[in-house]
């Protein structure tokens, strides 16, 4: 497997000074706007009928099979809780404020950050229980780390933004505040080898970010995820009665895809979840190895209920 670590980009002394000043000015203007927005949101009480405004972040697509990873930065996909720091407030992707201890928030740098709150591999449920409490459990938060993979709104490429994140977090000197490690992988075979090794060690998969891509919000062709199984979310629209051993319980959830198609999701449900299934109207995550010709998940297995944010 031919893999090398990605170092910080070298400073090019002979780069056009005017271009660098313009880029820096654009970024400062963007950050100032983010901070002003954060302050306004912190100091304003929204009407009761209005919920939080979703944070504009980059969203990943599925990595195309056999595509070459050259030109991409590769990192482990952490099974954590997405957290965005706008310089003033730490938020879920939904825009709802994360109620973290004061010592945790006060240690974050003024640079806007995008990353994952994380404890360890296979510990998502425990982490979720900690970070979603309305009153933070100080002792439990001591085990939470914030792994950062990007900064918001910067006008530079991903490689340039990565350098900025690394230097900013190094200056903060906080043990639980870390940049996500990035690698360069030379070919599709090496990428699959890395994926298998990561999953074998308990990881969920890989993320690939195009090194020369500029930041943009929403679903982008510059950010991808690669996992041994596909996963997505669907809306629970009904419950199917169980048969045989499951008589009197839920045999399967009737799940609706964003496309409007529906399918029965029964595999992966525990006995407790069959007795008290996710209610109609909730969103659930499921995994599956492939799709049918009509586009439905094949051999799908329930993973978890998506927690309200």
Image (cartoon, rainbow, N blue to C red):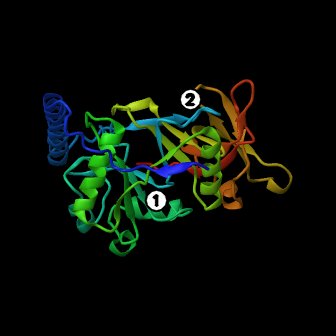
Q: Between disc 1 and disc 2, whose residue precedes?
A: 1
Q: Position of residue 214 (x, y in %)?
A: 34, 31
* Marks 1/2: CA–CA distance: 25 Å
Judge whether 96 appears above or below 29 on screen. below
In screen coordinates, is 162 left or right of 73?
A: left
Numbered label attached to residue 258: 2
Residue at 57%, 35% (x, y): give it: 63
Question: Which quadrant holds residue 212?
Answer: top left
The number of numbered badges drawn on the structure is 2
Q: Nearer the viewer, residue 236 or 219?
A: 219
Numbered label attached to residue 128: 1
In what element is the residue under mark 2? loop
In screen coordinates, is 182 left or right of 298?
A: left
Judge whether 21 appears above or below 81 on screen. above
Q: Position of residue 79 (x, y in %)?
A: 51, 54
Is any atom of residue 286 visible in this view?
no
Q: Nearer the viewer, residue 111 or 197?
A: 197
């Amino acid at each position: 497997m031919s893999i090398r670590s990605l170092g910080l980009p070298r400073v090019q002394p002979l780069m056009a000074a005017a271009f660098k000043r313009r880029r820096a000015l654009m970024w400062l203007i963007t950050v100032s706007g983010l901070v002003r927005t954060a302050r306004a949101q912190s100091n304003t009480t929204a009407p009761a009928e209005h919920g939080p405004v979703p944070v504009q972040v980059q969203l990943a697509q599925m990595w195309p099979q056999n595509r070459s990873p050259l030109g991409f930065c590769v990192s482990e996909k952490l099974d954590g809780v997405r957290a965005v720091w706008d310089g003033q407030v730490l938020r879920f992707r939904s825009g709802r404020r994360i109620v973290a201890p004061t010592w945790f928030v006060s240690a974050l740098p003024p640079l806007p950050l995008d990353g994952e709150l994380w404890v360890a591999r296979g510990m998502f449920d425990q982490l979720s229980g900690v970070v979603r409490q309305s009153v933070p459990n100080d002792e439990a938060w001591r085990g939470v780390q914030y792994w950062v993979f990007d900064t918001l709104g910067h006008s530079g490429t991903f490689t340039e933004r990565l350098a900025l994140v690394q230097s900013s977090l190094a200056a903060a000197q906080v043990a639980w505040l870390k940049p996500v490690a990035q690698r360069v992988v030379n070919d599709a075979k090496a990428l699959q080898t890395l994926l298998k090794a990561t999953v074998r060690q308990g990881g969920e998969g890989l993320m690939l970010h195009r090194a020369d891509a500029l930041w943009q919000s929403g679903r982008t062709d510059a950010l991808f995820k690669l996992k041994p199984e596909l996963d997505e979310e669907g809306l629970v629209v009904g419950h199917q009665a169980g048969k045989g051993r499951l008589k009197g319980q839920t045999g399967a959830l009737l799940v609706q895809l964003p496309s409007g198609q529906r399918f029965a999701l029964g595999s992966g449900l525990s006995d407790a979840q069959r007795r008290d299934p996710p209610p109609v109207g909730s969103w659930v995550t499921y995994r599956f190895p492939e799709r049918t010709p009509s586009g439905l998940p094949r051999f799908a297995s329930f993973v978890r209920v998506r927690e309200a944010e």
